[in-house]
Amino acid sequence: MLIPEALEEKARRGRPREACGVVGLFGVKDAAAVAALGLHALQHRGQESAGVASCLNGEFFLHRDMGLVANVFGKGEARKLPGFSAIGHVRYSTAGGSRLVNAQPLLASYVGGTVALAHNGNLCGGDDLSRALLEKGALLQTSTDSELFLHLLAQRHALADEEIAGVFAGAGAAFAVVLLLGDRLLAARDPWGFRPLALGRLEGGVVIASESCAFDQMGAVFEREIDPGEMLICSAGGERSLRFGESATLLAKCLLELIYFSRPDSFVFGHSPHIFRKSSGHALAREHPVRADLVVAIPDSGFSAAMGFADELGLPVDRGLIRNHYVGRSFIAPGQEARTAAVRMKHNVVREVVRGKRVVLVDDSLIRGTTTAALGKELRDAGASEVHLRIACPPTRYPCLYGVDFPHPQELMAFRYSLDEICSILNMDSLAYLSLEGMLALFPPEERGFCTACWSGEYRA
Amino acid sequence: MLIPEALEEKARRGRPREACGVVGLFGVKDAAAVAALGLHALQHRGQESAGVASCLNGEFFLHRDMGLVANVFGKGEARKLPGFSAIGHVRYSTAGGSRLVNAQPLLASYVGGTVALAHNGNLCGGDDLSRALLEKGALLQTSTDSELFLHLLAQRHALADEEIAGVFAGAGAAFAVVLLLGDRLLAARDPWGFRPLALGRLEGGVVIASESCAFDQMGAVFEREIDPGEMLICSAGGERSLRFGESATLLAKCLLELIYFSRPDSFVFGHSPHIFRKSSGHALAREHPVRADLVVAIPDSGFSAAMGFADELGLPVDRGLIRNHYVGRSFIAPGQEARTAAVRMKHNVVREVVRGKRVVLVDDSLIRGTTTAALGKELRDAGASEVHLRIACPPTRYPCLYGVDFPHPQELMAFRYSLDEICSILNMDSLAYLSLEGMLALFPPEERGFCTACWSGEYRA
Amino acid sequence: MLIPEALEEKARRGRPREACGVVGLFGVKDAAAVAALGLHALQHRGQESAGVASCLNGEFFLHRDMGLVANVFGKGEARKLPGFSAIGHVRYSTAGGSRLVNAQPLLASYVGGTVALAHNGNLCGGDDLSRALLEKGALLQTSTDSELFLHLLAQRHALADEEIAGVFAGAGAAFAVVLLLGDRLLAARDPWGFRPLALGRLEGGVVIASESCAFDQMGAVFEREIDPGEMLICSAGGERSLRFGESATLLAKCLLELIYFSRPDSFVFGHSPHIFRKSSGHALAREHPVRADLVVAIPDSGFSAAMGFADELGLPVDRGLIRNHYVGRSFIAPGQEARTAAVRMKHNVVREVVRGKRVVLVDDSLIRGTTTAALGKELRDAGASEVHLRIACPPTRYPCLYGVDFPHPQELMAFRYSLDEICSILNMDSLAYLSLEGMLALFPPEERGFCTACWSGEYRA
Amino acid sequence: MLIPEALEEKARRGRPREACGVVGLFGVKDAAAVAALGLHALQHRGQESAGVASCLNGEFFLHRDMGLVANVFGKGEARKLPGFSAIGHVRYSTAGGSRLVNAQPLLASYVGGTVALAHNGNLCGGDDLSRALLEKGALLQTSTDSELFLHLLAQRHALADEEIAGVFAGAGAAFAVVLLLGDRLLAARDPWGFRPLALGRLEGGVVIASESCAFDQMGAVFEREIDPGEMLICSAGGERSLRFGESATLLAKCLLELIYFSRPDSFVFGHSPHIFRKSSGHALAREHPVRADLVVAIPDSGFSAAMGFADELGLPVDRGLIRNHYVGRSFIAPGQEARTAAVRMKHNVVREVVRGKRVVLVDDSLIRGTTTAALGKELRDAGASEVHLRIACPPTRYPCLYGVDFPHPQELMAFRYSLDEICSILNMDSLAYLSLEGMLALFPPEERGFCTACWSGEYRA
């Protein structure tokens, strides 16, 4: 564990951005082991660290470590965490290296007792918040925003549900959190609803998860999503909800969840990500058709959009690129060097499929373009006569303040270059993105309320 | 390392079956590191252990351990193995647990000097061979057939190329091996050609690999396949080939390589596995069409066949099942308990795709049926109105003697049950396999020469 | 890392007791690596965890983990911690298992900046202190007293040296701490002087350590001990000292340091522990002589006292017991089960030495008596005709509140049983302890000022 | 596991020298776990690797790995090795790095069945033997002599006890081996008796160990030593012994076992090593008295001899040097660099003991002199007015061919330099060794039969 110093680092590099996954259980047998199972289903949301905290008779137990869920809990570690309530977390760490001290759940004592927390998101006013907390005498022991929640609880002596809801109301955006107390489990989502959080049932108990695919893995049944601005309280006396903030006017659900983050088999913001992505492919094809022989997805991220794109144009879709699944998802690996290596070790062309063909390459998004440029070159080397690139979302030009770890703007292709420049840099015969209007038109008018900041620069919180 | 005793185990459980991957390099800079890179591309062929042996100025260096290539060589271990020639191996261990002592390459000294060996295959006359060797005073220190090659070299004092070719000629089937000597690299394939082995070029040096996808990973260029009954010798003086056995009359290439084992982006036995699998899907659809709304592949093994099947019938193919890639390939995990767990942790249904639909489920093969039965149930639970199963190869009824680790016949569905019984057990609305004739008709008449033993019971060697 | 919940545990089990070792360096090249070397020399003070924090240009670096120094820093980890100032810590964890979260140095940010802390001792008013801190909004993230220092700094906004000295003045006893700030190193010892702390010189820089043996290991030269109630400040501008508390009236140096904890080759509280222990053996022999053939030390703790005892009576001392050094020190291993196993695996009798002999067994202290009882039996089994036990300190009857991890009083032999009962339980022919008066008489009158609480029950702080 | 090639290495570096420890059990409950316990007591004989093989109903089980017994068997690994018979081994590896492939026990199959072997010693005719074996078709898979035994069994089809005894008769020297077969345990010692091997009883079963201290650890009772040239056979039918070779005329017991290797609390070659070492100190003092104030042992190796030396001259012995036991024994650590580091990290002077004193430094042997030179300097730096060195054995001038890993003769002080030169190099005021005559005179005339090769150059085998 090498920890460059905490606060200063924040000032220098910008706050850490996290895109994590959380689970919570209350009233479930072997809660910790079931939580670990759920985390496995959320592994795509964070591969740097994994952890579970459980509670039995007011006593807390915690196990967390760097690595995949299968490594951290692969030898029965979860079975040593007793109790009928638990929370869990998978973390996607960012610049500055992997630090065990930042792994979650966090466990701490404050005047109200002991509490464990797992947080997905990023407090965009976190710098001001931490300055204010330090002024009041707080001692920050991690470099995560997540710790700030606990300091707010501690400094305000928040113990009753209403007090804790008050803390959430003042925390800004973005968060989806589960909080384990000695006698209850709390689950809350910020009033903007940036990050998803769902409620399910398992054996008469309550299950919370970032995505519903965790319910399938745990054998639980999806019931509904936690509302933006809702704090659900699960205790021996049953469940109830408190509302905080003014969610109706603010709503800013993160579209990247539907486009990229969530597993296709989840149910997020009322949608199937797979169906949504197919629709975006249809819309993209309508906006930017191309005369070609073949549609090829960048696997696995472009699969669904490519199917919609091909279907709209009546083109065949084929496996022109094969992915070696023995390495991780490039977007999610910290550090540029690992990413470069990953490009070379992750995709390979099927020459027999693309040779002599006009190929449309489809992906869900284009961030740095490193991988895409490499794949374009490989397709041409394998004999493709034309390579056209179609991206199923608008150009990504602005940083996210709400918990998605984007590279520095200077590394965002669409920030630095014009469309023509990008097309030229990537050596494509043509390039087109789905328009923001086209993206939003995929939803019925009454459903709007999404964050578009990374494309439009309009930050709602 | 827990090693149940070696020979007795063979007697009790039948010989270990292996489906491994090998690489060899001669005249290549940083040969060991490049070998490890190539092994990463062959990781799908064996995940139990990985190893590389290199040679510099007649001195040998070896590193091997249990685990994935990324684990065994993830900290620069390969860079500590100097030299311009190297061989590598990934192993798929079998019943009896994972044993380091069985990891390859093997390294040993005999009267001719020192030699390292990596072997893909299984000597079907191995029991007789090891008995004969023991009678002559051999000391067996592993429980693998691969060791027998080295004992044959030692007992026959084989040193010259022709003598070594004589050893290969007498070894029976099946093998694709690379042998590293102090001054040269040998690569040989049994006269039946059961297992694949290819030759490529890298920086003026020679590269050998089980599948051509390893060449892509290493940056090498595919040249040709090693012929059945060919022993290629690479030395400072250049390359030459010796022939042994009577390959023309024997040819028995393993069709499972095309159907299942090889990566879709490789080039094996003169074919693209992906293209071949699509063709098999077309043929399957012609033989056993079905009235349905949707074709769903069992990911990832059924992808290619499902595309051909859907195309033939003009049906859409959609992602009704999603695979969580954070676990390994079920067929390849040793021990039934791990497999059961893997079923639950690997696939999930996209309800929105299959709800109310008549689904055709397509896979490349049906062995035990455990996973398939579970998926059929999950599809129905998710609302599929009908589920039809189509398998893109004939019923697997007989054990493999040539290096593929099949379960005990009693665990092979098609051995124990009739077609109707299987359909009923798997709770499918209909079930059909591609016929053996249909399978063989995919090849031109002059190309025949495949092993069909696991379907037909006709063993050619 | 399994963390039973923090605060509640304290309430239930009594506060964790620690007997740790600390080092600090300022203005020394490769400070972190030298710190690790120093920790190796202090390994006897704590074997549960080890850690080093360094600072370069205001940026902090930290590495800490469970295990021995050789394990935690055995692969060059310290060389990755840059800077010319560093602090280090070895920890002796206690009941409740080993917890990484409690490993030191602690690193945190407060309003004054970032700070790292390493602490040897225990705040005997810690429960009140932590209650007061919690009331003021503190968030406790470990279950150690050491964290309280940092909270006091944070809540009082202590930044200037005088403010920090004020924090130390209010912290009670017992502590010897090193504090690393962005621009300076602080070293302080509580006004009672319970725990030792020494100052040395290395290459023109300053070195701090719990015991002088660390200086020998680091190649530094001992200069003096830090005074009780002194806070030494080392900065680019030089060194200066602040005084806090009223040390002269309070002095309570822990005699166990001389009797047991410190290495015989250190220089602690102005004494050589080895010479002191020999003197205690002389005094013990004068108080409680015994007619015997042979003096045998319980190795290694009783070596020095046994030499003095034998010398006083003109008896030979011989190696009747041999220690297997491949296991750790029994007193210092947490958990009774490990201790029982350790007894069996640590000592063995030399039959030829004790057979037919009247043996005096000498040790420095008697706590639980488990090991001693076992050794007594083994000596008799080996043929000793008589076994007399002499203990070179008074009967240990009371718990330590100042940082030594004693077992529960019910496990202290001298608390539960009379001298005769103990003699009978241990199956000794006679038993005697050095009297408290005899112990104190070993010092000149002007030097008094030692804590005798664990023998007398008189607690000075 | 990095394995430089096997045979060639032997040619270049000379054969590996081993000073290992073995145990064997027959008819003992939980034999493997008890074997691991015994190995812990023999840990001083080898710290590179540890292993245990057990047998149940003709099936063999093996666990071995690099590292200390506590590491290799610290998580209950031995409890997974079933059976009532087992053998174990601790290995002291040598130049060329630590190699798992050389760890013992070895397990292999030959025409007679399966066999496991653990060997302490070195076959001095091993090079010829391995050449002959290779000529006959053997395949060598380790770089140890120990493997040669198994090849001899295999090539001679040795199965009956008499045949196996014949193999031992032809193996030359030096060996103490235990051999586990499906139905019996064999223990044998070469006819010269170079290495020790003892027989004990445990719960009605048989226990074999290199030193009797292992019996104490296992709770077994020493019965007798295995005779030189004896092969003990333990089977369900009881025990019997075969004799091979002509031991009476050859006897060459290794005196270093008494002087250095064996634990002081063992019983070896009919002697207590501690008592023997004290006697050697007496003799040394008679031969080379010195006028001094104080005798200081180099801990722990010189303890016993220093006691005898001081007693003979009526001088006090005191703890002028303290050893930090958190590192290993210098003689036994492979590689010069580790040794240099170990010197600095292992011993420290007690200034108060030696300041102003004339010190006699006593050790059991002087090999390279590196440590001794460093300690002499440290004693003077600490204020000793004179430092005299006395060595309780003759000058070590010649290599050992029988299994003790000596450095190259050029690294042996007594080979390169005269007595005066050594005295000057080590900066001693005087230096003297016990004479060979003095050493041998410690035994009664009828007991002679020791190997003195490393002092005299007279090799008996």
Image (tube, coloured by chain):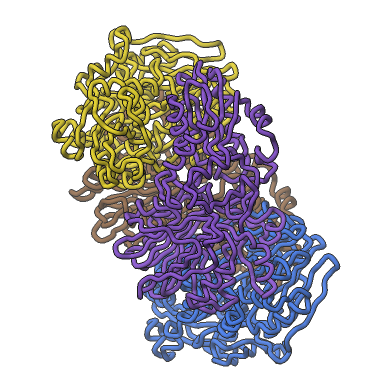
Chain colours: A purple, B yellow, C blue, D brown
Left or right: where D195 falls relative to B421: right
Q: Residue at x 23, y 26 (%)?
A: B433
Residue D52 horizontal/vertical position (percent)? 36, 49
Return the residue nearer the eye: D20 or C460. Answer: C460
Q: Quadrant of residue C167?
A: bottom right
Viewport quadrant of the C terminus of chain B: top left
Vertical arrangement, residue A420 with respect to residue C378, above or below: above
Q: Residue at x 50, y 31 (%)?
A: A285
Q: Residue furthest right?
A: C237
Task: Count all numbered tags in the image, as a single digit.
Answer: 0
Is residue C363 visible in the rendered image? The answer is: no
Q: Quadrant of residue C266?
A: bottom right
Residue C302 horizontal/vertical position (percent)? 54, 75
Residue C365 horizontal/vertical position (percent)? 52, 80
Viewport quadrant of the N terminus of chain B: top left
Return the residue nearer the eye: B359 or A460. Answer: A460
Is residue C31 visible in the rendered image? The answer is: yes
Residue A407 horizontal/vertical position (percent)? 64, 45
Q: Residue at x 45, y 58 (%)?
A: A197
Vertical arrangement, residue A327 with respect to residue B457, above or below: below
Return the residue nearer the eye: D126 or C401. Answer: C401
Q: Quadrant of residue A338?
A: top right
Return the residue nearer the eye: A139 or C28. Answer: A139
